[in-house]
Image (cartoon, grey):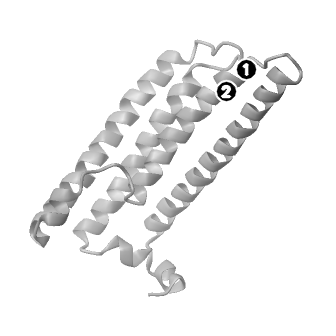
Amino acid sequence: MSTGKAAENKSAFDRLLDFFSCMNTIFTGVALVFMTVIFGWLVFGRYVLNATPTWVEQVSLLLVVYIGFLGASVGVHQKTHLGVSVFREMSPAPVRRIFDFLSYSLLAGFGLIMVVYGYKLTVFKWAAEIPLIHVSEGWRSLPILLSGVFVCLYSIGHLIHFFSHTNQEDNK
C-alpha cells in the first residue's frame, strides 16, 4: 500500500495521534539539540572564559525529563516502547491477540495513573522554584502528566484498532 493511500485510509483520530507523535518528536529533537548547544556553552564558559554558567545543569535536567517522558510516549504510539515480546512472538495468533489486548489495556491504565499522579505532583510542586533558573518546580513534573495523556491516547488508538480488527501497520 502506498504512503498516500495509507494516509487516506486513516481516521481523523489516527491522524490526530500521528500529529501529536510528530510534534512530540520535533519537540524532543529540538530539546536535544538545545541541550547539546548549552553543554557546548558550558564547556566554552568553563575552559575559555573561565566562568562556568551555573544555570546549564538545571536547564539540562529539565530538558532531560521532557525528552525522556515525551519520547517514551512516542514509543508507545510507534510500538517501539520497551516490552518483552518473546512469549507473544512464540504464541499462536489467538494468544498473541490476548497479549496485545493486555498490553494496550495495561498501557492505557498506566497512562491514566500518570495523568492523575502527574497532575497532583505538578500542582504540589508549582509553588516551589528551581534554583538558578527561577521557574516553577512544577515544570519538572509536567512531562509526567503530558506523557500520561499521550500514552493513554495512543493506547486507546491501539485498542480501537484491536477491536476493529485492523492492522495498524497497514494504516501507516
Residue 65 placement, left or right of 168: right
Q: Position of residue 61 (x, y in %)?
A: 59, 27
Q: Position of residue 113 (x, y in %)?
A: 32, 35
Q: Which mark is residue 42?
A: none
Q: Is residue 7 above or below residue 95?
A: below
Residue at 35% over, 42% down: 111
Point out the residue furthest to the right here.
49
Residue at 21% over, 60% down: 100
Dot 1 crowding, Cα within 10 Å, few <14, some 14–19, many 20+: some
| Secondary structure category for the residue under label 1 | helix
Point out the residue furthest to the front here.
47
Measured Cα–Cα span from mark 2 to mark 1: 6 Å
Q: Position of residue 119 (x, y in %)?
A: 44, 28
74, 51: nearer the viewer: 51
3, 17: nearer the viewer: 3
170, 16: nearer the viewer: 170
Q: Which residue is mark 1?
A: 55
Residue at 52% over, 17% down: 125
